[in-house]
Image (cartoon, grey):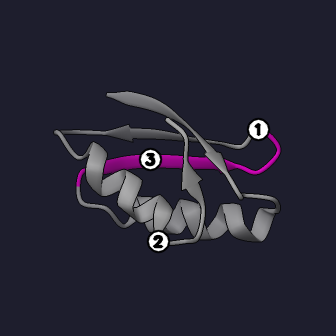
Amino acid sequence: MQKKIYVVGMFDDDTAGKVQSAVSAVAGVTSCTASAAKSQVLVDFEGAIDDAINAAISSTGVEVLG
């Protein structure tokens, strides 16, 4: 399954890298690309892990919009 998540607070490539690393570490995530320019995270994953993905994003100080 692929999901596009819009976020607030990912202002630079450093923060995007932290978000990408945190989400990629979630079990079931097969790929993740975070874009500061677009304020979005594209995630490919298996299973019902939406809450874990959102928690990983939030743990980096970035707010999930949906």
- Amino acid at dot 3: Ser
Query: Residue at position x 28%, y 56% from top?
Result: 52
Residue 18 is drawn in which quadrant? Answer: bottom right
Residue type pointed to by label 2 = Ser
Q: Is 52 placed left or right of 4 in the picture?
A: left
Between discs 3 and 2, the one toward the N terminus: 3
Label 1 sits on what residue type?
A: Lys
Circle 3 Cα neighbour tier, 10 Å, few/some/many (<14 / 14–19 / ≥20): some
* Residue position marked by numbered label 2 in the rendering: 59
Q: Which residue is mark 1?
A: 38
Instruction: From the top left corner, tell me how far across and down residue 56 is, in percent.
Output: 41, 64
Question: According to the image, label 3 marks what residue?
Answer: 31
Q: Is residue 33 magenta?
A: yes
Q: Quadrant of the N terminus?
A: top left
Image: magenta residue range: 28-38
Mark nearest the camera among 3 and 1 is 1
Pointers 3 and 2 in contact (CB under 8 A)? no
